[in-house]
Amino acid sequence: MMAALAVAHVIIAIALILLSTLTIFAFPLFLIGPVWAILLARRMWRGDPTVIQPLRRTHYVFLAIDAVMIAYGIAALKAAEESAKRGGGLLGGFGIIPIAIGSVLAVFSIIVLACTIGMSRRMTSA
């Protein structure tokens, strides 16, 4: 299971690195999460039993970031609706993008957190 999670972390990290290239000025800041995910994936791939706690903490933080992304998307959609009432709203659907990305990443974090519970039980019973 750790190997599959490691591969999933690398795939998602690469996708996030590619997405973060769209934000030229904030690119170094947005690299922190994906690089950390790749470092965790390396530890998972090697079967390091001490990776469970950092993995759990990381995904709690990622869940908070995902919630902020979803909230931003909802706020952007509400602002677009208000702008459309006044005759604007050219980029009204922009809010769907952070909602979609945040939702996918939140589901991934929830799956990882559920897997870490099972992995920690196996580690303590072994």
Image: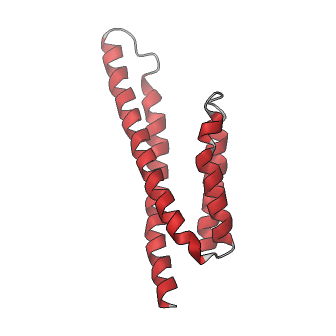
Q: Position of residue 56 (x, y in %)?
A: 48, 64
The answer to whether one can see residue 1 in this image is no
Q: Residue at x 41, y 16 (%)?
A: 89
Name the one closer to the observer, 58 or 93: 58
Q: Residue at x 39, y 27 (%)?
A: 76
Name the one closer to the observer, 26 or 92: 26
Where 93 sits versus 112, above or below?
A: above
Q: Residue at x 65, y 76 (%)?
A: 47
User: In terms of image quadrants, where is residue 25?
Assistant: top right
The answer to whether one can see residue 5 in this image is yes
Q: Position of residue 52 (x, y in %)?
A: 53, 71
Name the one closer to the observer, 118 or 33: 33
Identify the image's colour scheme: rainbow, by chain, secondary structure or one colour: secondary structure
Q: Position of residue 92 (x, y in %)?
A: 42, 22
Q: Position of residue 53 (x, y in %)?
A: 50, 68
Q: Residue furthest top?
A: 87
Where 9 sits versus 88, above or below?
A: below
Total numbered badges shown on the rendered structure: 0
- Which quadrant: the N terminus? bottom right
**Is 2 left, or right, of 73 in this rendering?**
right
Q: Residue at x 46, y 52 (%)?
A: 61
